[in-house]
Image (cartoon, rainbow, N blue to C red):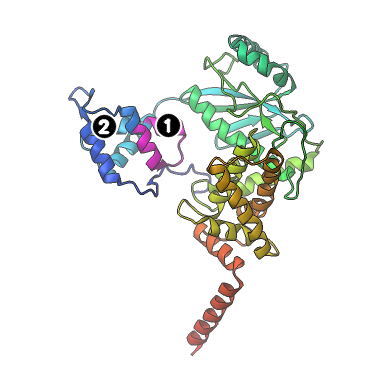
Amino acid sequence: MKGDKPEMKIEWKKTPADIPYLLQEISQSRVVNKDGSISTTDFFALSEWESVLLSHIRITEVSDTEAKILIEKAIRDHQTITESSLKEAIFRIKKERDKIPSKKFSVIFPILGLSNICIGRFNRNNVSLNFSPATSSSFYKKAARERAKLLARYPQHQTRFDTLLQKARWCTATIAARSATEAYELTYREIRVILGLIVFMETAPHSRVKSFGHPQPLAKVHIGPQMTVHTANGDLAFEGFWHVKSFSENLAFGRLPRRGEDFKKHLKDWLRKITSSIYPNRKAEDAIIKYYDAFSDHSVDEAFLGGWRVLEHLAGDRDTKYSKLVERASAFYDDPKLAAIYGFHLAERRNSLSHGHVVHQEHSELVIYQMNQFIHPMLKHFIINPYKLKSISEFYEFCDLAWSDERRHRLSRTLSKAMRLRRQ
């Protein structure tokens, strides 16, 4: 039924790995004792097997934290593990864990660059996000004190982050979760969907910014340092904090221009389009998250490579050749052949970076904007789906036909002949 939470699915990823052999090795590497304890029989610790399995299996509709717990428990469940027994164990353990009561947590995200825009509240996937929390509330005051005391324990971070935190505006994300870590992970996903759409809406495909000194990220909206998890009254629920690994306090952060109610309305329209996407496994959400992660990265090289990962996500899978990725993205331009030349230039830059070749700073900053320009039209069509495509395979077929005049004409001739046959 519409509105029901999607059911969890377990899928094996497309890898060259021999999965039955992998499960056989895990089975032989440990002994499940009668009392439920585990004895290992080889040099591979169980945590290493868990890590290997997580690379080969996809569990949808659960957080990464939950997926790790399910795998960890499932490989301790049977002495002999098979594909079917592993899936059965994961589903059963998930059902048991669903009975564990959740607690209410609030996660605080300091946001830089949104001071001119009031976008208010959003409710998504059981997460309530408030971009304008009341600074006079008892929760806000208590949480602010707890955050200050926590940061004071890390003087190396306090010196780096204090100035930026003074410029930041809070977003509080409230969720019911089984742990503080799970609360952070689930809310971090949702806030990146919203910020990713803001960056996408505000970043025209032809955007060009020339910085002086430190190269600047393409995004003007950033999640600042010190993301913390709190209980309902403002106490810390986790004695620590998170911050984006590439965060650089040396960058000169700007802010988005002032926007009115129309901006908020358009943002909600885009969110509805993403939420109602027909593509499976939240693929549209993942696309905008990858877009935000790429173009908010403070490393120009990582930003460019992140942009290429957005292209891979939109235009194919791990088996798709880079030439096909480029052609599919080029299909959304008036001159696909010229766009493809542009795309192959980006592919060469990607190969150079992947093999450790240094790109001159001013050129590396430029290619970030070129990458955004190249993928922007395809991402827009992927989210909006103006032609009402019904599946991801149909989307790929649409791109391939839009790219190739010869292929379209050949298909048109074949369809015409088939219709003539049916009329006989």
> Is residue 53 shown in magenta?
yes
Disc 1 marks a residue whose amino acid type is Glu
> Is residue 171 shown in magenta?
no
| N-term-proximal mark, 1 vs 2 | 1
Q: Residues within 10 Å of mark 1 (few under 14, many from 20)?
A: some
Q: Secondary structure at mark 1?
A: helix
**Does the image show residue 84?**
no
Residue in the image at 26% along x and 32% along y: 77
Q: Residue furthest left?
A: 34
Residue in the image at 59% along x and 24% along y: 243
**Does the image show residue 142?**
yes
Q: Residue furthest bottom?
A: 424
Question: Which secondary structure is most common in the magenta stretch?
Answer: helix
* Foreground pick, 159 / 114: 159
* Foreground pick, 296 / 258: 296
Query: From which residue to which does the magenta span run?
Result: 50-69
Q: Which residue is mark 2?
A: 77
User: Whole-Å distance between the Cαs marked 1 and 2?
Assistant: 17 Å
* Foreground pick, 134 / 338: 338
Q: Which residue is mark 1?
A: 66
Q: Residue 114: which disc? A: none
Asked whether, in this view, residue 20 is left or right of residue 269, the answer is left
Q: What x and y, as percent, mark residue 365?
A: 69, 40
